[in-house]
């Protein structure tokens, strides 16, 4: 086996919560009269909640205090949580689930490396609450992607060195974080466009061919 551990980003890789992030930010942006579209949204992939807000506010005319920003970020999270509430096992695709099972059966350790503070809630919703060998998320880091902290912690939790792990990401910031931490990386979705990853996945199932020799 080429890798002993696979570290998965969550939003946009394991499940499509990225579309809910977009909807929630869009609702907030409309509310405060700030222009926001899918191109700007792609810059928020992998980035923490507060840093995402700062990117959105680049188009805001005026000054906001730290408290006002905190309130806006909380509002966005409330909109987001409303959308997450409707998630269920049906939001975990067969191809993702089958790939995870195949990798585990091949002997890989499987971890989550996500910037989200909602990761545990989402995993429970889609039926993977107890599935991963380790979860490193927005609650255990102080620097978000492209800083490698979230992946370094994930590797540490599964007792592997970065060189033994592959990171799977849909965000350019996530691919950069992997590279910064000394991990090989596989890009899926939007991250393919940055051209920085070692592997490009058309579907998550491609991982089986890369990892299981
Ligand atoms: C990442 C998403 O997984 O989590 C980002 O790609 C998001 O878009 C970040 O901003 C933080 O998420 P949360 O759930 O803590 O607001
Ligand atoms: Mg992502």
Image: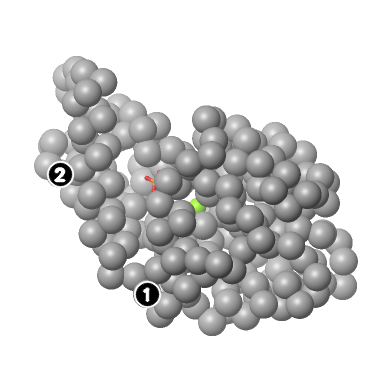
Is 171 left, or right, of 197 in this rendering? left
Q: Taking 179 as reference, is 70 above or below it?
A: above
Please give left or right for residue 40 compared with residue 31 in the image.
right
Query: Is the C-beta of the residue carrying label 1 under 8 Å from the nearest atom of ligand 1?
Result: no
Q: Nearer the viewer, mark 1 or mark 2?
A: 1
**Figure quadrant of residue 209:** bottom right
Residue at the image point whose x is 21% and y is 35% from the top: 72
Using the image, determine if residue 51 lies above or below residue 94: above
Q: CA distance from mark 1 to mark 2?
A: 28 Å
* 213 or 90, nearer to the observer: 90
The foreground one among 158 and 206 is: 158
Residue that carries the numbered disc 1 in the rendered image: 88
Q: Is residue 117 visible?
A: yes
Disc 1 is placed on an element classified as loop
| Residue 152 locus on image (x, y percent) | 69, 40
- Residue 100, quarter of picture: bottom right
The foreground one among 110 and 42 is 110
Query: Going 37% across and 39% down the picture, which residue do you hit?
Result: 49
Of labels 1 and 2, earlier in sequence is 2
The image shows residue 167 at horizontal and vertical percentages of: 68, 52
Label disc, if present, on residue 157 of the rendered structure: none
Secondary structure found at label 2: helix
CB atoms of marks 1 and 2 within 8 Å: no
Residue 29 left/right relative to 53: left
**Callout 2 crowding tier (Cα within 10 Å): few <14, some 14–19, many ≥20:** few
| Residue 141 point in image, percent of width and height | 54, 35
The crowd level at tag 1 (other Cα within 10 Å; few <14, some 14-19, many 20+) is some
| Residue ID for mark 2 | 30
**Residue in view at x 76 percent, y 77 percent:** 105
Q: Is residue 193 visible?
A: no
**The N terminus lies in which quarter of the figure?**
bottom right
Q: Is mark 2 within 8 Å of ligand 1?
A: no
């Amino acid at each position: 086996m080429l890798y002993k551990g696979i570290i998965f980003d969550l939003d946009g890789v394991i499940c499509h919560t990225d579309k809910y992030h977009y909807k929630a930010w869009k609702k907030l942006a409309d509310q405060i009269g700030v222009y926001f579209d899918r191109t700007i949204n792609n810059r928020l992939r992998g980035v923490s909640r507060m840093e995402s807000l700062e990117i959105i506010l680049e188009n805001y005319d005026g000054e906001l205090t730290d408290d006002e920003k905190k309130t806006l970020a909380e509002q966005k999270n409330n909109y987001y949580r409303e959308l997450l509430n409707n998630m269920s096992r049906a939001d975990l695709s067969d191809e993702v689930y089958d790939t995870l099972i195949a990798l585990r059966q091949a002997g890989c350790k499987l971890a989550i490396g996500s910037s989200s503070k909602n990761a545990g809630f989402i995993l429970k919703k889609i039926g993977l609450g107890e599935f991963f060998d380790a979860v490193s998320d927005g609650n255990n880091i102080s620097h978000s992607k492209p800083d490698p902290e979230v992946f370094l912690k994930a590797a540490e939790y599964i007792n592997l060195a970065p060189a033994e792990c592959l990171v799977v990401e849909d965000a350019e910031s996530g691919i950069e974080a992997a590279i910064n931490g000394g991990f090989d990386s596989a890009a899926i979705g939007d991250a393919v466009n940055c051209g920085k990853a070692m592997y490009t996945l058309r579907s998550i199932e491609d991982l089986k061919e890369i990892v299981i020799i």
